Amino acid sequence: MYMLIRSPQCRALYCTVIGVLSVLLFLCSFFPMKKHDVSAATKDDLPTSIRNLRLNVSHLYEPTVSRLIIIVIDALRHDFVADAGRIDSMPYTASLIEMGKACLLTARANPPTVTMPRIKALTTGTVPNFIDVALNFGSSRILEDNIILQAESHGLNVVFYGDDTWLKLFPNSFIRKEGTTSFFVSDFYEVDNNVTRHLSKELMSSDWHIMILHYLGLDHIGHIEGPKGSHIQPKLQEMDSVIKWLHQELMNSNYSAPPAIVICGDHGMKDSGGHGGASLAEILVPFVVTGHSCVLYLSSNVYRTDAVVAQIDLVPTLSVLLGLPIPRSNLGKLILGLLSHLSEEQKLYALYYNTKQVARQYESNVVTASQGGLLEFEEAVRLHKKWLTSHLATDPDEIMTLYTSSLETMSSRLADSLVTYDMFSMTVAICILWQVCYILLLTPQSVSWTPTVKSALVEIVLLCILFLSANGLYCSYTNCQSLLCTKTVSSVIVSLSAALNTHIIMNFYHPRAVRQVLWYTNFHTEILLLVLGSGLQIASLGATSLIEEEHQVWYFLWTSLSLISVYKLITSPSRTTVVYQAVANLVLHRLLRKWNQTGDKWASLPDIGDWLVQPENSFYLSITLFVGLAGVLWSIHILNEDKSIHMLDKALYVLGILCVYGYRTATGSVVLPFAYPQSRGFTEVHVFWCTFMILLGRLMFKANVGSIVSCWLLLCALLHRPHNVVLLAAQVWTSRLLHGDITYLTIAHVWLGMVFYFYQGNSNSLASIDVASGYVGHEGYNPVTVGLLLLVNTYSAPVLSYLLLLTHSAQQQKGFSLLEALDMLLAENLDGDIFVEPPYVNVLTDEGSWLGAVCLVLARMRLLSVSVFAGLVMSQRYHLFVWTVFSPKLLYESVHTGVLLVVLIATNIVTQLLRTKGIP
């Protein structure tokens, strides 16, 4: 235990492990798991009377659609259909809307705007959880009542072709089906052709009632090229031709009732091409409905066809059109404009049924809610009965308005009440996070007695029993259903962690250490700027606008640090070339901040990357990629300049670079001055991976830190967008301009990693994740490899900074860190009657001590940031932007902390292996 706490390296690793476990506990407690009602609605749920007045249900509630085709076009933005400038893209659909043969509605989807939660919303009528964004890669069967289950239960046959997410959510619900993977984003055409090829056979079949088609090509193009890409319009024209074919075939057939087609998007597409956030381009999708004529009813004698409806409103509306019971957990309200063919009596009955179904959930789940929605419902029922007995007694429009208003009130309140926060577990997680921050921030000193292993174990066990008892008493007294009350394993692990932290704090820390840190720390100007700047950045996380535009904070901090460095160089007798390099760094920063626009407000503005990826600029993109790859080779050379690189290694690095360029040429991103062999890029990537694995294998026998960084650079060059490869060399060059002690280098490299993280185009929105990087060279979908590649690409800049920091630190072991200064100051100034000064080992001459100092500062910065933000998120859990701003940032902070833990573990393992082999 003594060595664990006295060793900075072990202390950083221990605190990071406990910190990651605490973050996991907080995530499980914060992201609410919705209560599921697994019961299904039946025909018996249809109201047979209204206030003792018998109703003719068979007449009032009957199917009015014979066949229904639902076409889900993934990432179909509303303006793709509604924008007059795109009428050439979908001319047939636009003509149907203009002639009144189709109704265009604007639907609003709830974040997270990813496929699986949107499918849940479109079929169950409920609002999915935010955490469903994480489950999007591992979809499981829907347990709630849904329209597919209702169709199956009432004899309606359903066929499906498209995104295989549907097959995971509804595994045994289709009489015929074929899925296509939604994650192979480099496929623009085959993924849709595999859907369309079944249509001829299905149009000639008469055994189905509902056909669902989910096209993925548009979404794939968006991830690669964005909404203004060259393949967008041809893809929209392809979708329009499919709609024309289906519509003409259905309309020319004889059915007992009119058929209907619903064309919609599951979510939209951000201007940068991604999705997952809450921008208007992501949440606004079109609903185009053909079959019956439609007018959207808003209020008395007012009709419009351009109002905004909720995406979940489609579920009760389709249920009424098909004559099916509305799913029991539905929160949507009827879109009256799509029911204009019904009589007033039928529309009022449908509204009564819909409102009664939502009111049942409202009364069961909203305990302390306002009665406003229920009072409106009761008034609507009273007027409804009065109208049924005497049609002249009241206006049906007034009754519809009351029903609709009641539905809106109850639905919104229900969406908030059906989720619960685990406050107890969140509080415990934050307390443990602050414990490890306390252990990290202060410098430990041995006390007058050193506890034996036996006494330490006894104390830890007793503390663990104390925490378990307190947890049990709290849970039994409050009848709490917290994670720590229902899961024994979680409770034991958390109690053991808290007990171990308490033991460490009680035996190895003194309260006056805080005063000693403040009194005896002598910060020079740059260190002071780094510490204050890091604190400012953490404080900025309390503002939603600064979270959305966090890159601006980092750009400001980096510019300030660079200006101070230039000033110090100018005012000191330094070499002129060094001053020129520092000024060049400022110029480079100004250029790269316009490389990829990010954030929320200005992400849609054109930038250098947008210009380079345009088809007419492929020559300039090719030059940029060539320069970037040459810069990677230069970086590999200078990182290993003090070591002799074997000729085989040099050849492997060059081969890897050639494979990267060959892959981008094969996929059409860049060009060569000569004809390139026909290829889809798979061969080039396979050769790259073989080369990369050989390089990794050679690391086990002869390696140094520079070789590890070189392998990371090579991997990132493959995954980065072609125009972003140049950022790798720019980051290595900028890192070489940083000089100072270990503390300065560590904090400065953390800043450097975050600055280049945003240069790459990343942000705190889930929409900025470059999904295409997970499928480089893949012919199929593997969630493990895809997830790892996405992590590598997203956090490539911070990890590269950590690795470059290790190369700096290894070369500057004679530097003097703040950690070591505090150790000596505290050892000299604390009272001798309380502390026994241990035999002080000069860590400056201790082999590998720089690694411990680096790990400690990294752990301090990361855990302090995530601890503060976890507290902010818990306090802002009812904030208007909790799901659109705070929650995505929490996920990013959590994953970043996990990435740091992996880096620390890998660094320690590799260091020990190299040390045992005598390799520096």
Image: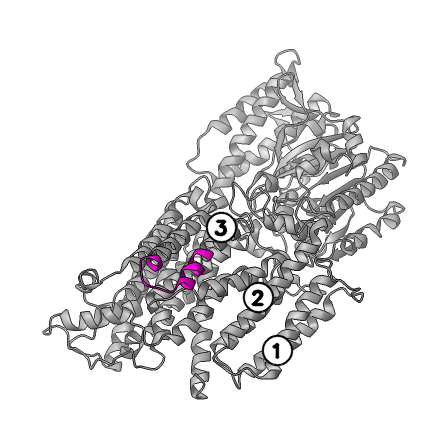
Q: Nearer the viewer, residue 484 or 570?
A: 570
Q: Secondary structure at mark 3?
A: helix
Q: Nearer the viewer, residue 417 or 564?
A: 564
Binning the other alpha carbons within 10 Å of mark 1 as few (below 14), some (14 to 19) or many (20 upward) gives few
Q: Specify which label sits upstream in the sequence, 2 or 1.
A: 2
Residue 680 visible in image: yes
Q: Is residue 361 above or below residue 903?
A: above
Q: Specify which label sits upstream in the sequence, 3 or 2.
A: 3
Q: Amino acid at mark 2?
A: Gly
Quadrant where the C terminus is found in the figure? bottom left
Q: Is residue 228 above or below residue 138?
A: above
Whole-angstrom CA distance, mark 2 to mark 1, is 22 Å
Residue located beneath label 1 in the image: 693
Residue located beneath label 2 in the image: 631
Q: Secondary structure at mark 2?
A: helix
- Left or right of 617 in this view: 406: left
Q: Amino acid at mark 1?
A: Met
| Secondary structure mostly taken by the magenta-highlighted segment of the chain | helix
Q: Residue at x 82, y 50 (%)?
A: 196
Q: Residue at x 28, y 78 (%)?
A: 843
- Left or right of 461 in this view: 873: right
Q: Is residue 378 above or below residue 525?
A: above
Q: Nearer the viewer, residue 913 or 674?
A: 674
